[in-house]
Image (tube, rainbow, N blue to C red):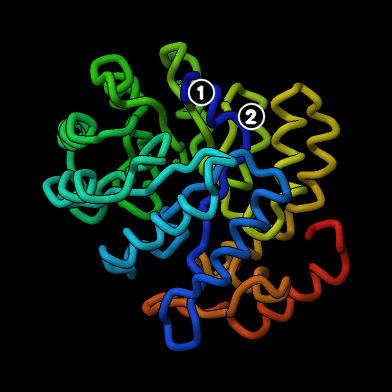
Amino acid sequence: MSLRTQLRGTGVALVTPFKEDFSIDYEALERMIEHMIKNGVEYIVSMGTTGESPTIGKEEKKAIVAFTMKQVAGRVPVVVGIGGNNTAETIHELKTFPLEGAVAVLSVSPYYSKPSQEGLFQHYKAIAGASPRPVILYNVPGRTGRSLAASTTIRLANEVPNIAGIKDAAGDMLQSMQLLKDRPDNFLVCSGDDSLALPQLACGMDGLISVIANCMPRKFSDMVRLALSGRLAEAKQLNDAMLETYDLLFAENNPAGVKSFLFHLGLIRNVLRLPVTPLSEALHHKARLLLEADPSLR
């Protein structure tokens, strides 16, 4: 089965729940995993950047991935986030993380150093050659400082066999359309922008890796499935109901917004590791009011 088939639909970039002492809350992580599967997401992404991976140690990451694999137990595919701006260290992690049960690796573009397009190509070529699983590129220039150009993505897709897809969070519809126009037939293109998912799906994307699906897995997954089946008017109705939530989720930082919603749903504590802080009190209250006003958002 191709990755485009396996990962068609909604993947959730799973948050990492913490206890009040900032240690990993595995009981809450188990609740989150069960909540996602029960409410119909197609797959789970463990240790993506929404999981606060920059502030989680390597041994903690390995333990979280292993726990997630065990809890999911093959019921849905699992993608593991492994990436960074140190190519050699990323390759080391690819060789040492528990990836036996993963269908793919999601690897964020190098951040801060702002490499050239050739540097990005060579970085991804190197890690794809070392990865035991297919690699999904992750382009999020708002966080990394450098966009992976559509031409570089297509070059990787055509020249590097283990590059299997891209999570496109560039926020650039023209670039998205260029990717969809030029990609090889077996190359996965999924959105990384919840608020742009509907128009991107309408243009031909295969699905998305979502933040909002953490707190609204049923409604958001239903919207994605409707869009993928061509029922765009029905998908738009569901999407319209979530527009205010999109704004609130990213009003201050990610994952503070989604963790606020998850706290109000009783799934996790509202705890984040510095330098990320919880949502301000006014917005935290607004999240509760949104959920109370429309229970269908749950």
Q: Is residue 90 left or right of residue 252?
A: left
What residue sits 54% from the left and 28% below the top?
6
Q: Please name which of the two marks, 2 or 1, marks the residue nearer to the observer.
A: 1
Residue located 32% across and 20% down the image: 157
Q: Residues within 10 Å of mark 2 (few under 14, many from 20)?
A: many
**Amino acid type indicated by mark 2:** Leu
As drawn, 9 above or below 59: above
- Return the mark for residue 4: 1
Residue sitting at x 26%, y 63%? 58
Could you tell which of marks 2 and 1 lies nearer the N-terminus?
1
x and y percentages locating residue 241 in the rendered image: 81, 51
The C terminus - image quarter: bottom right
Residue nearest the viewer, comparing 227 with 203 = 227
Q: Nearer the viewer, residue 81 or 293?
A: 81
Look at 43% across and 88% down and name the residue there. 21
The amino acid type, in three-letter code, at marker 1 is Arg
Count of labels in the image:
2
Q: Position of residue 227 (x, y in %)?
A: 73, 29
| Quarter of the rendering containing residue 53 | bottom left
> Pointer 2: what residue?
201
Image coordinates of residue 229 in percent, x first then y, are: 74, 23
Q: Position of residue 2 (x, y in %)?
A: 47, 19
